Amino acid sequence: MTALNPRRDQLEDFFDNAPCGYLSIASTGEIVLANRTLATWLGHDAAALSGKRLYDVLPFTGRVYWETHLRPLLKIQGNIDGVALDFLSAAGETIPCFASAVESAGDAPTVKLAIFKAAERRQFEQSLLKARAAAQENLRSERATAELREQFIAVLGHDLRNPLAGFAGGVRLLARENLSEKGAKILPLLMGSIARMSELIDNVMDFAKARLGDGITLDRNAAEPLTPALQQVVDELTPTYPDRRIELQFAIAEPVDCDRARIAQLVSNLLGNALAHGAADQPIRMRAQTAEGFLQVSIANGGDPIPPEAMAKLFQPYFRGEVRANLQGLGLGLHIASEIAKAHGGTIVVDSSELETQFTFRMPLG
Amino acid sequence: MSPALRNNVRVFGSGERVMMFAHGYGCDQTMWRYVVPHFQDRFRIVLFDHVGAGASHIFAYSPTKYGTLDGYAQDLVEIAEELDLSDVILVGHSVSAMIGALACVKAPTRFGKLVMVGPSPRYIDDDAYRGGFSETQIAELLDFLSINYQGWAVATAPVIMGNPDRPELGIELTDSFCRADPDIAKDFARVTFMSDNREDLPRVAVPTLVLQSSEDIIAPIEVGEYVRDHIPNSQFVLLEATGHCPNLSAPDEVVRAIRAFV
């Protein structure tokens, strides 16, 4: 006995008791041959199967799928591999299967199918599909929640502005009164805090707006001078740090086509950082100049350098460096600053060493 | 995007008159490969893929436009307009028989004759009308197709690298046939099987040939007769062939019938 010369009874045994179902169909759709394995699965007598039609062993959906997809494919390319195809048992139960098929060419083509039971695999596939659908649904709802949260932040920020404006007005009125020595010391601190708070609100609102798709909007004006706007930023921030020295150098000789309020916000963020993180015993050097078609504002402070691993994340939203407990913020300042720079077609570059940490904003003049 | 690009339009053959072939649900323009060679010597042939099928541009898909068969019919008209065709013999199989009828109603000068292979204006039974399917069956079917498409769209269109038994298919075999974008195919199945275009039949003014298989579970004989009875200028040919795709299983008989008509 060799594999090349099997005896007839061996072939029959191999056919009938194969671990898969065999089925051959004439072009009329009549079943020509079915093996015992398939007959057993379907609850038929093998002999009773021949003479029946393919449609008799397919559920309704399988018949339509066969006509619209599988039969055309067989006609076009002669074979199909591993497609899902359910069968129908004599008792009317659906039996999930996979089938491969070939169609022989010639005048009386027959289709030969090899059929594998696939109940567990089908279950596995369906749970995969369900898991995918659930994951997509989760993602959708997470996104919706995130959007709602950002809308909430935008509205909250907006609502906080009004009471804060009232507060600032009150403090300004108080400044005109005759105050005690103690009162005169406290007032600038209050003004500094108001400026800081209003800056935080601006950042939060800008961030929320950018997330909601509005982006940073600019109101450019090249005619107005920029220096006073920058000076005001310094004046607003210094009261909080009365002991810190800030070396200022303004050399803005050319008109700058920018949104001055935005640039002031950018500089305020950079300067606020320098004041908060720089060494208290070293001066901050701020230089603003126009040269060779660019505006350049650099702000440098002494103290510990920014760790290299933090450099890459510096401009990401919600990033906070090693902050001291009393200086906790949202970590939006540098992110907003870089967005404002981008909106102006500019960049912010950071250099940090043992000697000093310097942020440089650079944008084309117009 | 140009309709010709969008629908992967192929134009070949020679002749004064034009034949345009529209494939049905579940396949693509390769559906016509055994029929077209019999006509390309005497006609200009236009083949295309519906958006979502074959090598069409799926980015052109819009659930709104293709939410009814009308959107698909619009594509046929747009192709005819872009190629500046008139008096076209339009051959549509299965759901595209109805899509073709809608195109003829929309642009009666572009299309001069219509051949409907296995048409059905409505698949679901409705009072006295017998479409062949109950509403439950169609719901069950759409469910099944949606599962099969999500999981096994790739498996239903295996890539095969050559077929010694079918040398006539040549090197195109290295590509896969009847590919469909799973999401679009799901939509197309729903649009197809839920469609009801019975009222459009009397508006088809062009001479029409209805080709009916003698056994077709998708479009039974009485449905074909219904189409014949409601299109004013129509002929009906009952084929000996069985099954829903006589253009594949009995191309010679289909070719003979179309030839006699054109």
Image (cartoon, coloured by chain):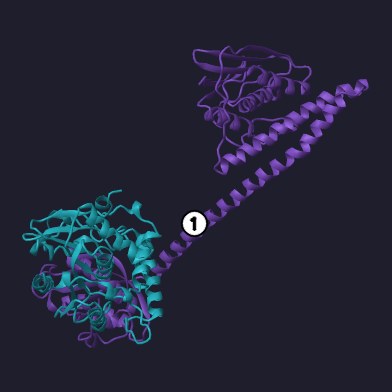
Q: Quadrant of the N terminus of chain A?
A: bottom left
The residue at 34%/61% (across/down) is: B71
- Within 10 Å of disc 1 (Cα), the crowding (few <14, some 14-19, many 20+) is few
* Residue A319 pos. (x, y %): 61, 34
The residue at 38%/56% (across/down) is: B62
Q: Quadrant of residue B86?
A: bottom left
Q: Quadrant of residue B19?
A: bottom left
* Residue B144 pos. (x, y %): 38, 71
Q: Quadrant of residue A13?
A: bottom left
Q: Is residue A158 above or below residue B53?
A: above
The residue at 8%/58% (across/down) is: B15
- Relative placement, left or right, of A50 versus B127 is left
* Count of numbered tags: 1
Query: Can residue A314 be spotted in the picture?
Result: no
Query: Can residue A343 be spotted in the picture?
Result: yes
* Residue A120 pos. (x, y %): 40, 69
- Nearer the observer, A287 or A9: A287
Which shade of the palette goes to chain A? Answer: purple
Give the structural element (helix, strand or loop) at label 1: helix
Task: Kindly identify which residue carries mark 1.
Answer: A136
Q: Subunit of mark 1?
A: A
- Nearer the observer, A192 or B75: B75
- Nearer the observer, B56 or A217: A217
* Residue A324 pos. (x, y %): 72, 30
Q: Is residue B116 above or below residue A314?
A: below
- Relative placement, left or right, of B178 versus A150 is left
Which shade of the palette goes to chain B? Answer: cyan
Q: Is residue A300 above or below residue A170?
A: above
Q: Name which residue type carries label 1.
A: Gln
- Relative placement, left or right, of A241 versus A131 is right
